[in-house]
């Protein structure tokens, strides 16, 4: 093997038996300098396919020259993965209090403003970058040392964020319920949409809602805007962060994982980490949407649902999306109620169970979408 | 419409708000006399596809002459259907105590022996049948009237069984986790395997384990054996009961439901309930297995599983069934562990989640199977 | 009976069987005019004691003259009450997605600013109050009519809020896990602390975090501040809202419920709704704390916990709060780890289970508290 | 310290992250020979108080001479302890399939009959005892080596049983939901009731239902009966096994744990394991009941329950046990429904949540009980 993979385990929690719950951290350090990449998977415990993607990445990266360092953390949430409720995995939130496992990363706009005051208009971008990372690391460490303690999800998130803060590129590998591939991209890095092989791209603004991608790019984005406006500079720190949604949860598929690993290799190649890689982005149609146009359709009725529109399918306004069976009216024409598309849309995902209460999120959909690239 | 469908609701439970939980009972009574059929679905709350099958049956049966009576009870377990845990339905057991919703039907061998003592060798089969039903109804009613009360699952089961006791043919509609079509058939009714369109048939002996099919046929089977042996008679009461496993849980699919409805129509036609029906069994390969050869494969390891063998696929001894990803060994050749078929087999179903602890039921498989009919 | 109690049911959800889930609404309308009071209980499904309090209130209020109207909604969350997981009730959040049932009420600061523009400095307080209510009702109705639908928790919250918007006094009845009595009071209504019989009072600022009390008082508070600052007026709309935490969840206790009903009667008497009531506040010690000083103590270790400090007990800095058993060190002096009070404090509640993961909220505590009233 | 405590960990499962789940095994081996004792706790994950009892036992036993060996296994079910669902622990059954964690121990009556054939009427009791243990160990090992694997609960049970098979005295430490102290005793060992300090004793017959105590004594009981009847001998192998129910689940209480540890020390002293111990059974009233008279009371109604009768309280026929609040009838005299004692009884435990569906086990009660010892 060309590259040595180093492996350590970090403790992120302790269970009710008092045993440590550890996360494996794989590091591939290239012989040449270059950017740092941080990739994690399964922060939502049932979204396991990213672990296969990391498996393929490690296999691939062991045998190719690397410029820089790649840190890979599969199964980064051992608590979430191990909460079964029935046959499935209750992986999206802490079963004790409902806290989403992907909403406790650190962000504090005041800290950015404070830091900005320490920057002169003569300080180099490289120096600012280094100092800001140290500043942010310290803020996270201080948060973790809180004398009254912190909640489990937040502790987990902060310990992972400590690994991610020094990275230039952060990839958080997720899955949807029943889903087709889509990716969240910060608006300022929209060109990177063309470096991955994702057919559906969601562009997000500079607003922190708790997730790792936002926790990564919001500080840099905010700092850049602040300094550039204040000092009439054109600083660009080059940090990018993405949430990759690679198909459906509760599924392991080695062949599909290889496709997504290739997509990531394509991005890393474009970013200069893999000097001898010949992997280029696929020739494919890519569709984009603004986050504000990525809409959730809730059902008004409880009942049992057939999901007629498949994720990825182009649906016209008024076409059938779903049908809700009504078990009390099977002998008449109200036996099933249709749900129609309120406008032209592309569903990205649908709810994974046929049984729904009213107010269940049936579909999440692209609306007002546009073409980024045309496949030939 | 040719036939009137009558509909009533029976109360099977009361929830923690003190509200009644009702089950819809549809009855189609033919103009001519004939057998009674009882069909229920969704005793396991996540196994919802039977509700669609009943929908199609009711649509079909409204417009065709019927000899006899057909009672249809969709969504027969409103408690199980409504326990969500995460996005899925915790439908197989009572979330309070783990009791399987399909194990509390009434059976008491002593009652059969007691009843047999009341039968003379001159009593007609028809008379015995009528009296035994009354006897069994009374026993269930007495059980339900227990002065210390009964558990929720048992109450639910007994109230449904009260509807089923008078039926000649009982069909309990289920689904597997991720599953292909298969059917449980009592050994004495093995010919009926050819009247349904199920490619996989499991033949079960006269042993009561709590389910509705057994609760239906075990009493008649035991009584028949007892009287025939005692009095050298050849009584045959003609009661049959089946558990139909029609694909995967958590799914509603109207088109697939029509296929299963047709299969049931084929059986009802064969049994004389539908004098003008032209529906005949499909020309298809049917494979049989003894219950003792229907085997469960448990995993020795915990981890994340790719299910390589599809339900229904013929797998040879030593072929790959599944692969378990080991997130701590992604950098070496122990990154995934193969699970091989211990003998020639056909998986009927596999676990629906990729995340498994050791001791999880990975597959249930036909072994030592044989051909019942050859499709051309 | 002196007063007629009217009772209706409103539909707040539909379950997976397609059945309506209803909430009972009791209304006691006095013969004389007066303020409107809205009281609900059990928005968190396991916090059931408020239902007993409402029972006692209805019994009491039927026989006494009332000026104004009292609306009482027990068991206001039929979904939460009916999700069992094991023997307990998973009542604090939607089991599907983790959404807290008490965080989806409507608030929109922009709507207040918009409304303020329509107010002249000559409009009377009464007129403003009436128009603002109508404005707010319309905003909620519009939210509920959202063409893409709304999530279950939010739908539930908004339908309840529609009942509460017209009230002058809103009481949301809760319980803590293992808890002593405490009450949340908006800072501007701090005098009302002396009208209830709660020994522990938390004063909260004008910041909306999603709960019903905040959703009630934040709009009025914000509007008042805005208009009074703009027009140099001293408007006071007199709307008050409270969250009452009346002991421990998962418990029904009729005798304790009578104590809390009396406390509420005392408040209603002070507010003029019960002209003939002689109930006055108890002579008792009341302790207050600012919300910022109401602190959560998280455990750093997982393990099994003895809660040594009782809710309500005054604990000095450095005294023992809890002990965590370590099952791997029972043969040495690390068999149990002590948790000490980080400062002088009074625990209000502790976690209800002995088994905790790291990062579990062990205690919520008053710190920097002060005396509101001295009992003699 | 007088005695060395040896400690090892055995692997009983692997979680979905592929990590081993271990159980701590403490062994105290006396300098002098004597019987072997096996004590485990928390096979039901929420029943944690036995872990404190084992803590106190280990503290006590380190400093006193021991004849024989004592094996202590706290927290013997690391899977069950770590399944949280809401704030509580879903500890009684496997969350995947509902299997009770205390029903998968090995027992096979045919194996006993087979073994009995190998015993001559001249073989000594000691020899039979040794050979039967080896026979049983082998049968368990064979079961564990099953080529198709075994379910998780059964694997866990068998691995623990391997530790227990060689013991003369087996103590399985449990808790009830909300419970007073009671103990299960095999009828043949009824004198041992007087060696413990349990006020309530349930005498059980020779019938295997899956639990560890039965799995321990049923084989010896059956073998003894078989050989004594066949060969007119009066063999007595002296093996005893008990299930100790020591108060309520979800609670750790060090002071209460010391009381139960003393009770066990009293039993071990009586059995000769602690030659210098002066601990004698308490002078107390002990009440006995046949298992058939230990009855479960189910509620007919769903609703919210006040448990009026405390565990341990003597209740006369017709006295009030519980009250069910009916939230739809709070304005009339059906607002609460009383539940009366169907006969004279002593409740041992009641359901731990106020919210119940119909068919919930409200109370388990002694009926037709009798006095074993009178306290003075």
Image (cartoon, coloured by chain):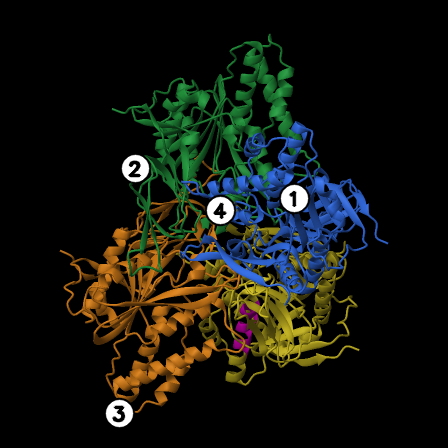
Chain colours: A green, B orange, C blue, D yellow
Give residue B290's quadrant in the image. bottom left
Dot 1: within a 10 Å radius of its alpha carbon, few (fewer than 14), some, or many (20 or more) residues?
some
Question: Upstream in the sequence, badge 1 or badge 4?
Answer: 4
Closer to the camera, C146 or A274? C146
Q: Are marks 3 and 4 on the same chain?
A: no
Judged from the image, the secondary structure of the residue bearing numbered disc 3 is loop
Quadrant, the N terminus of chain A: top left
* In the image, residue D221 lies in the stretch drawn in magenta: yes
Relative to C229, say whether A324 is above or below. below
Residue named by callout 1: C239
Q: What distance separates the C-alpha of mark 1 from that of mark 2?
A: 49 Å
Whole-number angstrom distance, CA of label 4 to CA of label 2: 27 Å
- Eyeballing the image, is A374 above or below D265? above
- Whether tag 1 and tag 4 are in contact, CB under 8 A, the answer is no
Report the residue marked by disc 4: C155
Crowding near the residue tagged with mark 3, few <14, some 14–19, many ≥20 C-alpha atoms within 10 Å? few
C-alpha distance separating marks 3 and 2: 70 Å
- CA gap, disc 3 and disc 1: 85 Å
Quarter of the rendering occupied by the C terminus of chain A: top left
Residue B101 occupies quadrant: bottom left
């Amino acid at each position: 093997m060309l590259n040595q993979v180093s492996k350590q385990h970090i403790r992120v929690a302790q269970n009710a038996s008092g045993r440590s719950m550890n996360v494996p951290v794989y590091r591939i350090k290239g012989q040449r300098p270059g950017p740092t990449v941080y990739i994690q998977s399964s922060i939502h415990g049932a979204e396991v396919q990213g672990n296969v993607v990391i498996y393929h990445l490690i296999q691939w990266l062991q045998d190719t020259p690397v410029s820089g360092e790649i840190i890979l953390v599969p199964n980064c949430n051992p608590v979430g993965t191990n909460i079964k409720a029935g046959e499935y995995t209750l992986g999206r939130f802490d079963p004790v209090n409902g806290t989403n496992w992907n909403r406790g990363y650190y962000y504090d706009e005041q800290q950015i403003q404070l830091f900005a005051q320490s920057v002169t208009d003569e300080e180099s971008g490289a120096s600012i970058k280094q100092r800001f990372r140290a500043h942010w690391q310290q803020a996270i460490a201080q948060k973790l040392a809180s004398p009254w303690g912190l909640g489990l999800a937040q502790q987990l998130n902060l310990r992972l964020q400590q690994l991610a803060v020094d990275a230039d590129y952060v990839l958080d590998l997720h899955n949807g319920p029943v889903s087709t591939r889509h990716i969240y991209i910060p608006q300022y890095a929209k060109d990177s949409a063309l470096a991955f092989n994702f057919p559906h791209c969601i562009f997000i603004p500079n607003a922190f809602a708790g997730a790792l991608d936002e926790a990564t790019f919001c500080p840099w984005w905010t700092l850049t805007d602040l300094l550039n406006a204040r000092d009439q500079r054109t600083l660009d720190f080059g940090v990018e962060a993405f949430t990759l949604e690679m198909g459906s949860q509760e599924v392991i598929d080695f062949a599909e994982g290889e496709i997504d690993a290739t997509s990531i290799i394509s991005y890393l190649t474009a970013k200069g980490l893999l000097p001898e890689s010949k992997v280029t982005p696929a020739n494919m149609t890519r569709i984009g949407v603004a986050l504000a146009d990525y809409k959730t359709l809730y059902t008004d009725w409880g009942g049992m649902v057939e999901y007629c529109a498949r994720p990825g399918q182009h649906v016209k306004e008024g076409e059938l999306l779903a049908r809700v069976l009504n078990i009390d009216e099977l002998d008449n024409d109200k036996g099933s109620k249709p749900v129609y598309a309120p406008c032209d849309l592309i569903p990205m995902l649908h709810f994974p169970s046929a049984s729904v209460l009213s107010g269940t999120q049936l579909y999440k959909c692209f609306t007002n979408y546009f073409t980024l690239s045309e496949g030939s």
